[in-house]
């Protein structure tokens, strides 16, 4: 495997974290992520990739194994979702820029919406990049995604939703094509399917930074949800006019509209809450980034409701915006691509155990906030699991398993006591 | 006779070994004399102060550990009282990482027994 750059290493570790989190989120049945370029594998599909980390996981290095641009583009095309819930995984900013360029060019030729608008050769792409990157440089730095790029990626993620309904779309802007599909359709069943598809979408940003991408995605999803609910309200109104009886027709729509609080002040908050708490996930390389993202999303929710507390993040967001394990996160921009030494893992275990003791003492002293305690224990538990998993993987294979675990236990007395059943399971 | 680094050294305000930053900031209020043990030149370098409450928010304990690891990769030494549990944990991390530390002990240090970690760090000039 080629040497990883800092960004790639960060994203790969993010992918490792999100694999475990995806299992927690019940998106996948087990820890494996089916990544396929042929579009036929079951499980999670990669709708659009922002870089090469995903293919790294699958054993491919896109840049190394597919230097030909045409081949790479073919892989991107074939990794499309073709049914069921799906995930868009964002990995690398460079690919975001390319997609943005393609989409921008397409917007300039509204008459021709097909894939042939994409650059047909590597030279063409290089020329476009040279022109477009000058524009981009003025708008963002290496780690920002320009808003049009986010919209383009969202469109790719949501395109299968519109295609499933067999509807045409004509705009390249964020989600407007789907709104056209919703508004132009008179079929309640179609609206219902679009709604269901929206609720199944998961958008995962593997390096969410300060959460700009996620905020933009939340706003776009909110627009789509509101469009759907508007259509549903229209269907209900139409049926009431026709039947004049307020009968049980479109009961599903009525229930959803009642849940959303249609007509009430909390409607906006409910919709945005649905988008943020159901559809979005993020992985940050630093805990500070995760905190900033959580806070920004909390404030986005609070903007729709004056009574919401913005002094701390919503607890649900802490489960959706996670961080990499600190022991493998980059320090001072240098990635740690080598396996940890045994002493490092044991030291990490001691530190985690000490953190647990401190938090427990805070709890016993009655001076800790319940939400903060829950968050702290959760994070410590994740750290513990990560250390144990790594230790088991690196040093506890075969005959040495029991002895190695015993050694780890000595450095981890408080926490291991609570997780003995996990520790003493034989490794697969 | 060469001074052992662990031996206490008494430094008056007028002494050239007195930390210039302290003298500059506090002027006539600067404490005198100072009793030092270890490598006194650390006080003249840029220092990164560490404070943590006795009762911090529970969800910040782990992030304090992460921050300590980040600090241990920086060049500047870390200074603090290291009294609260989190501060003590940070000190342990710094010493285990071989990072230079300045400990402001809120007690008389001339006859203070040093722990093994502290003694090793002083002997290594940290």
Image: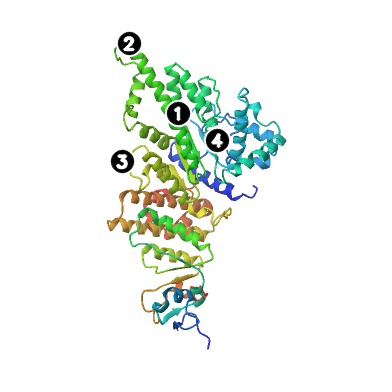
Q: Which of marks 3 and 4 is nearer the N terminus?
A: 4
**How far apart are the two marked residues, 1 and 4, measured between alpha carbons?**
17 Å
- Can you name the residue that lies furthest to the left here? A366
Q: Which residue is drawn at 52% across and 59% down?
A: A342
**Which chain is disc 3 placed on?**
A
The answer to whether tags 3 and 4 share a subunit is yes
Q: Nearer the viewer, mark 1 or mark 4?
A: 4
Q: Which residue is the site of mark 4?
A: A148
Q: How crowded is mark 1: few (under 14 residues within 10 Å), some or many (20 or more)?
A: many
**In the displayed structure image, the side of residue A374 where residue A142 appears, left or right:** right
Q: Which of A392 and A21 is in front in this view?
A: A21
Q: Which residue is the site of mark 3?
A: A307
**In the displayed structure image, the side of residue A148 where residue A356 appears, left or right:** left
Q: What is the x, y in percent for residue A80?
A: 57, 30
C-beta proximity under 8 Å, tags 1 and 3 = no
C-beta proximity under 8 Å, tags 2 and 3 = no
User: Does B77 appear above or below A62?
Assistant: below
Q: Is mark 4 on a helix, strand or loop?
A: helix
Report which quarter residue B58 is drawn in: bottom left
Q: Residues within 10 Å of mark 4 (few under 14, many from 20)?
A: some
The color scheme shown is rainbow
Q: Residues within 10 Å of mark 3 (few under 14, many from 20)?
A: few
**Which chain is disc 2 placed on?**
A
Q: Is mark 1 on a helix, strand or loop?
A: helix
Q: What is the x, y in percent for residue A103?
A: 60, 31
Q: Is mark 3 on a helix, strand or loop?
A: loop
Q: Which residue is the site of mark 2?
A: A243
**Which chain is disc 4 placed on?**
A
Q: What is the x, y in percent for residue B13?
A: 44, 82
**Which chain is disc 1 placed on?**
A
Q: Which residue is the site of mark 1?
A: A224
């Amino acid at each position: 495997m080629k040497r990883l750059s800092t960004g790639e290493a960060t994203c790969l570790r993010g992918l490792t974290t999100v694999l475990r989190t995806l299992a927690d989120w019940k998106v996948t049945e087990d820890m494996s992520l089916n990544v396929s370029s042929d579009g036929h594998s079951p499980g999670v599909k990669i709708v659009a990739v922002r870089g090469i980390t995903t293919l790294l996981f699958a054993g491919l290095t896109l840049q190394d194994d597919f230097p030909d641009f045409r081949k790479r583009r073919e892989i991107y095309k074939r990794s499309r979702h073709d049914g069921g819930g799906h995930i868009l995984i964002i990995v690398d900013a460079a690919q975001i820029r390319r997609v943005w360029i393609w989409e921008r060019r397409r917007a300039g030729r509204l008459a021709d919406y097909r894939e042939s608008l994409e650059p047909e050769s590597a030279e063409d792409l290089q020329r476009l990049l040279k022109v477009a990157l000058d524009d981009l440089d003025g708008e963002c730095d290496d780690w920002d995604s320009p808003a049009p790029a986010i919209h383009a990626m969202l469109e790719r993620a949501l395109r299968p939703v519109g295609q499933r309904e067999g509807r045409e779309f004509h705009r390249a802007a964020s989600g407007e094509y789907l709104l056209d599909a919703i508004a132009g359709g008179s079929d309640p069943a179609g609206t219902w399917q679009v709604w269901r598809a929206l609720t199944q979408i998961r958008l995962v940003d593997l390096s969410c930074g300060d959460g700009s991408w996620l905020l933009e995605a939340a706003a776009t999803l909110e627009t789509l949800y509101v469009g759907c609910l508007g259509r549903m309200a229209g269907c209900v109104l139409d049926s009431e006019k026709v039947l004049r009886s307020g009968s049980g027709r479109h009961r599903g729509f009525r229930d959803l509209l009642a849940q959303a609080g249609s007509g009430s002040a909390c409607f906006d908050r409910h919709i945005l809450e649905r988008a943020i708490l159901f559809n979005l996930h993020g992985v940050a390389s630093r805990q500070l980034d995760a905190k900033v993202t959580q806070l920004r999303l909390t404030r986005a929710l609070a903007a729709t409701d004056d009574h919401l507390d913005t002094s701390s993040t919503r607890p649900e967001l802490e489960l959706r915006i996670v961080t990499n394990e600190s022991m493998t996160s980059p320090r001072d921009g240098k990635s740690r691509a080598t396996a940890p030494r045994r002493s490092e893992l044991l030291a990490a275990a001691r530190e985690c155990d000490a953190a647990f003791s401190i938090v427990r003492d805070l709890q016993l002293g009655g001076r800790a906030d319940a939400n903060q305690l829950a968050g702290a224990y959760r994070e410590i538990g994740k750290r513990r699991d990560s250390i144990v998993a790594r230790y088991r993987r690196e040093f506890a294979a075969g005959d040495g398993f029991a002895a190695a675990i015993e050694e780890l236990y000595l450095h981890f007395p408080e926490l291991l006591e609570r997780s003995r059943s996990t520790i003493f399971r034989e490794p697969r | 006779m060469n001074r052992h680094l662990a031996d206490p050294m008494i430094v008056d305000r007028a002494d050239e070994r007195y930390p210039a930053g302290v003298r500059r900031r506090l002027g006539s209020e600067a404490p005198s004399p100072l009793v030092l043990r270890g490598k006194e030149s650390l006080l003249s370098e840029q220092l990164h102060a560490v404070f943590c409450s006795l009762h911090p928010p529970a969800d910040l304990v782990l992030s304090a550990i992460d921050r300590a690891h980040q600090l241990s990769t920086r060049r500047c030494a870390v200074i603090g009282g290291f009294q609260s549990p989190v501060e003590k944990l940070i000190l342990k991390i710094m010493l285990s990482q071989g990072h230079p530390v300045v400990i402001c002990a809120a007690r008389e240090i001339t006859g203070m027994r040093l722990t093994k970690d502290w003694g090793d760090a002083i002997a290594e000039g940290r």
